[in-house]
Image (cartoon, rainbow, N blue to C red):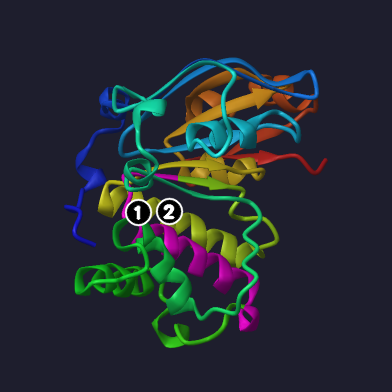
């Protein structure tokens, strides 16, 4: 991609906390059928990081990131992207700044991987792709290691291949901010690890800022810079991974005892006992 590469290893871990804030969420609330599913939430997302949102089902994670991407309308509060109110962005302008991959991606027409990835250029080309647009498509296909199967149809793909194709589409959109809602759903361990390693590369090599809703807290622990824990529509705690992955915090979030072990400098949660 044309974005300048970033060497994350050159940035001391303690300096990640001084990375500029890209997205500010202030006192945001949302309700469905009279019930508040997001209640007075405030959180900052720093540029050039992966922020994972964890918590039990119904915690409000997906609703929150849906409001950040403007797929869902907030009822109270303020969301700022690079200091500008979310409402001030024209839809086309916002689509060049923030991309989102939802949990369910149901496309009713038969597409090849290459055709799907080209959809990521819609905010720029309105389906009239230029040579520059196709360059982004080609680079996204290569980045996600899809070149050999780019002409296969989506219904011919495994779950992992299909998810990589959708992430390639998001990558071709070339936004600074990428939001992913449970991208590991229905994937086996190998493909889940592959996706998380790819997301890490997008941040470390291309300087992207990624927000991800993830249920497996070990993936959040091993690949994130920051973790935001939600429960009952509110933020329980937030912070760096080593601050968040401890038995007291996890008990408060999940209402169960979770042991934490140190493995290769990562904190791994053991919750099968």
The reply to whether the C-beta atoms of the residues labelled 1 and 2 are less than 8 Å apart is: yes
Does the magenta run of residues contain 171?
yes
- Residue 71 x/y as whole percent: 55, 39
Residue at the image point whose x is 73% and y is 32% from the top: 258
- The residue sitting at the right extreme is 273
Residue at the image point whose x is 43% and y is 66% from the top: 119
Report which quarter residue 159 is drawn in. bottom right
Report which quarter residue 273 is drawn in. top right
Name the residue nearer the viewer: 56 or 102.
102
Instruction: Tell me: 67 left or right of 236.
Output: left
In the image, residue 28 sits, relative to residue 228, either above or below, namely above
Residue at the image point whose x is 30% and y is 30% from the top: 16
Residue tagged 1: 202
Name the residue nearer the viewer: 82 or 8.
82
Within 10 Å of the Cα at label 2, are there few (<14), some (14-19), or many (20+) other Cα atoms?
many
Query: Can residue 65 be spotted in the picture?
Result: yes
Q: Which residues are magenta?
A: 155-178
- Disc 1 to disc 2, how far (Cα)? 5 Å
Element marked by disc 2: helix
Within 10 Å of the Cα at label 1, are there few (<14), some (14-19), or many (20+) other Cα atoms?
many
Instruction: Tell me: 48 left or right of 245.
Output: left
Element marked by disc 1: helix
The tag on residue 199 is 2
Report which quarter residue 46 is drawn in. top left
In the image, residue 73 sits, relative to residue 272, either above or below, namely above
Does the magenta run of residues contain 97?
no
């Amino acid at each position: 991609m044309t974005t300048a590469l970033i060497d994350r290893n050159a940035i001391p871990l303690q300096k990640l906390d001084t990375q500029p804030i890209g997205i500010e969420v202030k006192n945001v609330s949302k309700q469905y059928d009279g019930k508040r599913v997001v209640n007075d939430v405030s959180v900052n997302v720093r540029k050039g990081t992966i922020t994972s949102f964890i918590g039990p089902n119904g915690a409000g994670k997906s609703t929150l990131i849906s409001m950040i991407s403007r797929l869902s309308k907030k009822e109270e509060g303020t969301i700022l992207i690079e200091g500008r109110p979310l409402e001030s962005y024209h839809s086309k302008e916002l689509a060049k700044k923030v991309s989102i991959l939802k949990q369910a991606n149901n496309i009713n027409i038969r597409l090849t991987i290459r055709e799907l990835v080209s959809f990521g250029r819609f905010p720029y080309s309105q389906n009239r792709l230029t040579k520059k647009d196709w360059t982004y498509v080609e680079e996204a296909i290569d980045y996600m290691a899809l070149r050999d199967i780019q002409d296969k149809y989506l219904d011919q793909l495994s779950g992992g291949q299909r998810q990589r194709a959708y992430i390639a589409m998001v990558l071709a959109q070339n936004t600074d901010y990428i939001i992913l809602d449970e991208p590991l759903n229905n994937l086996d361990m190998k493909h889940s690890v592959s996706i998380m390693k790819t997301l890490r590369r997008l941040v470390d090599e291309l300087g992207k800022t990624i927000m991800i809703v993830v249920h497996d807290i070990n993936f959040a622990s091993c690949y994130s810079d920051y973790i935001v824990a939600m429960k009952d529509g509110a933020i329980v705690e937030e912070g760096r991974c080593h601050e968040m992955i401890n038995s007291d915090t996890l008990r408060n979030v999940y209402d169960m005892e979770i042991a934490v072990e140190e493995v290769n400098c990562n904190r791994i949660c053991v919750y099968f006992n």
